[in-house]
Image (cartoon, grey):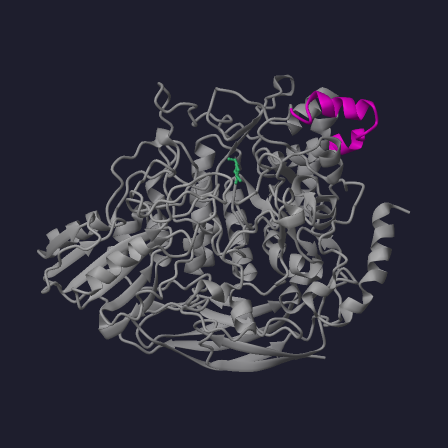
């Protein structure tokens, strides 16, 4: 009997009682413990990948053991600026591989675009936009000679509000995150670029993500149900979309490092989800040789030489790792390469457009393309969310004088791609807004930074062709209309001409990989807002925000008439903002996370876990809240947020009508799926069990797009969970019909005993509307 089968039986006995009720932490069998799952499964080969595997097997069959091992480990080189490289094997005409950051556009390279970041795409709730953006981003990777784009990010999911990387991903709702990840994978891979969906899994804080001194990486401790219903969910969508690569994360999962966790890689990913591609380690995330190989890791970055390389060859010769395991690593890597058509002679050579040093002479390789222009702009636009608009402050009505304040309105003083990223040193506001992250692994700059932000910092940062800052875009508009524009970006208590028609305060909330934010609002920024509001009756606040930003210190001030979360808009930031301010464009973005009133409303989910007590050397992060993060938690605890998940205003109004639900008679409603495993899990998880329909009408006076949202109450789970969204564009009086297909997975909960998704018999409340708390249509789906 294999250890996994034995463990499965023990687990079954141990958690039978727990399974009776849908109580999250009761399947403690998994909690804080990571069951072994061996051996590492060879790729089972889905029909979609059959041709690629046939070629890959033939290819790998010609290689020596050393050549196979070389495919599994990064090499350090100075020929190009790829984030990671696999060496060529000239003997068999294999050109090698270039892996490059990241999910929001190619990083640290000239002739590339600064796209709106993941969070803005999340706020757009727009699948088509996500797809087109991914095609554009990936086209730049391809032209630059990158084989693997290190993104999209679906972990962190956003459990901890202060996490420095939440902006890289789409949303802390797994359904929204998964739907947009699906489009991103499909869009990127349609142009032949392999996506590295990251970071697998439960990577929810930067603090202690890596060992520091004697202190180990944080362990994310979570139960099996929470794993499936929350953190694994978007990865499942990405695998279903056919991703060729997944990156394992820095953290430990239930006490075992993610990149040597057999339960996560061998079981969840390669068995349950039928993943066809290969797993790469996050850079430096490998902590063992034999253990990581046998647990399912296939490629290590940035170098194979620490634990693999010659050591892996030796491990095969002495029997610690089977030859079949190394064959499977190499075959998975080469299969992904064939699957995306990267063996084609027109695929640019690895790293050919990515100079090692942009300040040294190099060939000009253009990644950007004018045909992406509208998508770049649309990404910025739809990421803006209008959350307050009192006295019809917006859109601006032929203003004669605008006063502009705040450090985020202006372009940073300098930008040079060779600096690599927006990071410490690019900005400095002085001690009022800087902090030293004493509890963080790395020290970082303040949460508000001097100059407008177009992306967050770290490996997810991208490079602008130009920056349309709010100040420049507003100046251009003033010139066109012949409007007055005064500004002061330096003072915290600026002079205000009281006859100003509007005072715009543009500020930010910065975040970066490497450190978690020290808090969710800062006094420095609040004081600028309050000082302007004290002197100006029409104060419009704009945040470029790479993290949740609390607003209760100023939002009820009667002179604060409007508030916009611009999120992380990329290079078209100012142009998008100004079009929205003037009503040339309508707002259509929605909050992809909630903004509570106070830090305390998060119940501890606003700060990273630290080493403590008996775990002084082994920081533990207990996900004891289960699936109850963000709106699931606020609903469960009856906490009214300031701005709920899914909320966002428009210049028009919409009315919903006619909810209908129909069961699909031809699809089984048996308790468990019976289908074979395809990419993403059992095939019938994607059967459409029921379809909800409704209508929406634009009842206002201007054209607009509305994100119609469907929430479902799955018995025993959160009172409601997002399970559908559509975004029709409607002319005045225009009506659209809404169709929300509900798959078996959408309606199921994870059964920890059966180790399957269970479709329960019973009543499922349904809600349709314009936010998670504005749901005018209700109905019930009955499964019997
Ligand atoms: C570490 C980051 O966590 C990951 O997202 C990135 O892709 C790699 N470094 C490579 O830069």
Residue 580 visible, this orientation:
no
Q: Is residue 24 above or below residue 148?
A: below
Left or right of 783 in this view: 472: left
In the picture, the quarter occupied by the C terminus is bottom right
Q: How many marks?
A: 0
The residue lying furthest to the right in this view is: 1
Residue 622 visible, this orientation:
yes
Left or right of 69 in this view: 580: left
Q: Is residue 95 above or below residue 450?
A: above
In the rendered image, which quarter is residue 430 located in? top left
**Where residue 523 appears, x then y in whole percent?**
32, 56
**Front-most of 25 and 745?**
25
Left or right of 191 in this view: 5: right
* Span highlighted in magenta in the image: 306-327
Q: Is residue 257 above or below residue 730?
A: above
Q: Is residue 495 above or below residue 708?
A: above
**Front-most of 738 and 88?**
88
In the rendered image, which quarter is residue 303 located in? top right
**Where residue 144 appears, x then y in whole percent?**
44, 31
**Front-most of 187 and 506?**
506
Q: Is residue 318 magenta?
A: yes
Which residue is at 30% across, 74% downward? 732
**Where residue 576 appears, x then y in whole percent?**
29, 54
**Where residue 270 appears, x then y in whole percent?**
71, 46
Q: Is residue 362 magenta?
A: no
């Amino acid at each position: 009997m294999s250890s996994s089968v034995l463990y499965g039986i023990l687990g079954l006995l141990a958690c039978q009682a727990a399974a009776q009720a849908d109580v999250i932490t009761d399947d403690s069998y998994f909690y804080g413990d990571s069951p072994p799952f061996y051996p590492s499964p060879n790729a089972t080969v889905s029909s979609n990948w059959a041709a690629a595997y046939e070629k890959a097997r033939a290819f790998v069959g010609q290689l020596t053991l050393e050549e196979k091992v070389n495919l599994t480990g990064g090499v350090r080189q100075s020929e190009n600026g790829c984030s990671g490289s696999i060496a060529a094997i000239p003997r068999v005409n294999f050109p090698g591989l270039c892996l490059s950051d990241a999910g929001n556009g190619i990083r640290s390279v000239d002739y590339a675009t600064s796209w709106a970041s993941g969070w803005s795409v999340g706020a757009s709730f727009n699948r088509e936009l996500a797809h087109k953006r991914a095609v554009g981003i990936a086209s730049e990777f391809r032209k630059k000679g990158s084989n693997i784009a290190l993104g999209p990010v679906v972990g962190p999911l956003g459990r901890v509000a202060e996490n420095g990387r939440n902006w890289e991903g789409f949303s802390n709702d797994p359904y929204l995150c998964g739907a947009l990840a699906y489009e991103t994978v499909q869009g990127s891979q349609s142009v032949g670029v392999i996506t590295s969906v990251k970071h697998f899994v439960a990577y929810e804080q930067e603090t202690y993500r890596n060992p520091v001194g004697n202190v180990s990486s944080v362990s994310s401790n979570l139960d099996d149900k929470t794993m499936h219903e929350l953190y694994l969910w978007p990865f499942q969508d990405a695998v279903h979309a056919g991703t060729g690569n997944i990156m394992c994360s820095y953290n430990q999962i239930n006490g075992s490092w993610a990149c040597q966790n057999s339960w996560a890689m061998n079981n969840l990913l390669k068995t349950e989800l039928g993943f066809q591609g290969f797993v790469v380690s996050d850079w430096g995330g490998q902590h063992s040789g034999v253990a990581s190989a046998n647990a399912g890791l296939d490629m290590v970055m940035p170098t194979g030489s620490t634990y693999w390389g010659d050591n892996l060859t030796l491990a095969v010769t002495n029997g610690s790792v089977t030859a079949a395991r190394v064959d499977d690593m190499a075959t998975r890597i080469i299969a992904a390469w064939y699957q995306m058509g990267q063996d084609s002679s027109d695929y640019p050579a690895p790293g050919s457009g990515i100079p090692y040093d942009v300040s040294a002479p190099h060939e000009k390789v253009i990644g950007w393309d004018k045909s992406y222009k509208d998508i770049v702009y649309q990404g910025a636009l739809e990421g803006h969310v209008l959350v307050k608009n009192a006295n019809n402050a917006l859109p601006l009505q032929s203003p004669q004088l605008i006063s502009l304040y705040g450090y985020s309105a202006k372009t940073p003083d300098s930008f040079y791609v060779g600096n690599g990223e927006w990071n410490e040193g690019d900005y400095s506001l002085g001690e009022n807004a800087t902090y030293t992250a004493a509890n963080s692994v790395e020290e970082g700059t303040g949460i508000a930074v001097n100059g407008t932000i177009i992306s967050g910092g770290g490996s997810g940062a991208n490079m602008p062709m130009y920056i349309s800052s709010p100040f420049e875009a507003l100046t251009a508009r003033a010139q066109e209309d012949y409007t007055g524009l005064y500004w002061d970006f330096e003072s915290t208590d600026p002079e205000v001409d009281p006859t100003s028609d509007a005072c715009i305060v543009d500020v930010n909330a910065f975040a970066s990989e490497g450190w978690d934010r020290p808090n969710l609002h800062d006094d420095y920024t609040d004081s600028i807002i309050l000082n302007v509001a004290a002197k100006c009756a029409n104060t419009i606040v704009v945040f470029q925000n790479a993290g949740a930003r609390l607003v209760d210190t100023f939002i009820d001030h009667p002179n604060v008439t409007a508030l916009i979360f611009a999120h992380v808009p990329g290079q078209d930031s100012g142009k998008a903002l100004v079009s929205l301010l003037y009503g040339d464009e309508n707002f259509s973005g929605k909050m992809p996370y909630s903004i509570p009133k106070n830090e305390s409303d998060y119940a501890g989910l606003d700060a990273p876990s630290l080493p403590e007590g008996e775990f002084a050397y082994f920081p533990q992060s207990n996900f004891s809240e289960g699936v109850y993060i963000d709106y699931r938690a606020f609903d469960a605890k009856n906490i009214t947020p300031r701005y709920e998940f899914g909320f966002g205003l428009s210049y028009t109004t919409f009315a919903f009508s006619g909810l209908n639900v129909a069961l699909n008679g031809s699809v089984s409603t048996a308790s468990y799926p019976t289908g074979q495993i395809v990419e993403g899990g059992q095939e019938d998880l994607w059967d459409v069990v029921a379809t909800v329909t409704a209508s929406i009408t634009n009842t206002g006076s201007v054209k607009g797009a509305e994100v119609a949202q469907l929430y479902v109450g799955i018995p025993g789970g959160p009172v409601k969970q997002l399970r559908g969204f559509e975004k029709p564009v409607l002319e005045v009086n225009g009506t659209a019909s809404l169709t929300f297909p509900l798959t078996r997975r959408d309606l199921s909960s994870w059964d920890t005993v059966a180790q399957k998704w269970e479709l329960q018999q019973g009543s499922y409340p349904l809600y349709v509307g314009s936010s998670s708390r504005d749901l005018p249509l209700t109905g019930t789906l009955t499964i019997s």
